[in-house]
Image: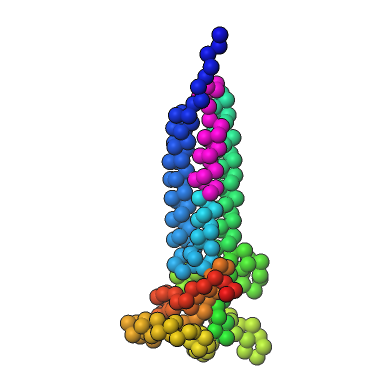
């Protein structure tokens, strides 16, 4: 009589934990890339870094080990086990490439500050699709960087679209800063006053990203200091 094989729970768990450990190493590298490179500073919440991190966690840490737990069986022949591992690896690699492509396309590439006081954080996908914006992030003559992302100031003197680095658009900056201050609530103005007490005169602008918007406070050299009053975009 053929002996009935027991369900290989322990072996499945060992294989799953091994796959999980390897996946966590890959995810750690991806997470550093997202936080430091693609969605730095206040852009992490504002432009979708949190959502990108969750997407990559699901793709890299959940999908692969889950497939391993479902498919792995030590009672199979070695050739079948290797074949299963290759298939799982191919599925996970394909999902990982898709996830990396998605978070790269949606990362903030250019922030455009308008003279009426609001700045918009544009994604790589949006900037690449618009010829007027595409060359700005890499042009030292037109943009500067705030928290690692290129900024440019938009104005329309004599009806002509003009883009300048913040340092060369003092009049537009002053107008935008004044508009942002008028729109702030008393509580937000009080927070701003505290930062000015410790850092001197600062710039404040309303910045709207894909997921949230906030008043962003910069020092006179356009270094990021803090954000105030962050809310979901559209509220």
Q: Count the numbered circles shown.
A: 0
The answer to whether residue 86 is seen in the rendering is no
Q: Quadrant of the N terminus?
A: top right
User: Residue at coordinates 54% horizontally, 63% vertically from top-left?
Assistant: 48
Judge left or right: residue 161 versus residue 77: right
Judge whether residue 127 is colored magenta: no
Judge whether residue 74 is colored magenta: yes
> Which segment did they paint magenta?
58-78
Q: Nearer the viewer, residue 164 or 125?
A: 125
User: Residue at coordinates 63% horizontally, 86% vertically from top-left?
Assistant: 156
Q: Which residue extends farthest top? A: 1
User: Residue at coordinates 67% horizontally, 88% vertically from top-left?
Assistant: 159
Q: How is the image coloured?
A: rainbow
Q: Nearer the viewer, residue 65 or 101?
A: 65
Q: Position of residue 87 (x, y in %)?
A: 59, 35
Q: Main secondary structure of the magenta part?
A: helix
The answer to whether 208 is drawn above or below residue 186 in the figure is: above
Q: Quadrant of the C terminus?
A: bottom right
The answer to whether 100 is drawn above or below residue 180 in the figure is: above
């Amino acid at each position: 009589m053929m002996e009935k094989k027991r369900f290989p729970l322990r072996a499945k768990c060992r294989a799953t934990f091994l796959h999980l450990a390897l996946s966590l190493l890959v995810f750690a590298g991806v997470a550093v890339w997202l936080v430091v490179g693609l969605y730095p500073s206040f852009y992490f919440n504002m432009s979708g870094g949190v959502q990108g991190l969750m997407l990559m966690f699901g793709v890299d840490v959940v999908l692969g080990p889950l497939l391993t737990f479902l498919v792995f069986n030590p009672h199979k022949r070695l050739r079948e086990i290797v074949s299963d591992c290759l298939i799982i690896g191919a599925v996970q690699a394909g999902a990982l490439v898709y996830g990396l492509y998605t978070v790269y396309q949606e990362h903030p590439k250019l922030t455009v500050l308008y003279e009426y006081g609001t700045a918009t954080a544009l994604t790589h996908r949006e900037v690449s699709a618009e010829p007027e914006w595409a060359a700005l992030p890499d042009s030292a003559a037109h943009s500067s960087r705030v928290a690692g992302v290129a900024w440019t100031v938009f104005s329309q003197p004599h009806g002509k679209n003009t883009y300048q680095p913040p340092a060369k658009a003092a009049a537009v900056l002053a107008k935008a800063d004044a508009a942002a201050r008028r729109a702030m609530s008393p509580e937000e103005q009080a927070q701003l006053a505290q930062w000015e007490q410790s850092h001197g005169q600062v710039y404040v602008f309303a910045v709207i990203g894909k997921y949230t918007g906030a008043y962003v406070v910069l020092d006179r050299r356009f270094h990021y200091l803090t954000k105030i009053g962050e809310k979901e975009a559209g509220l």
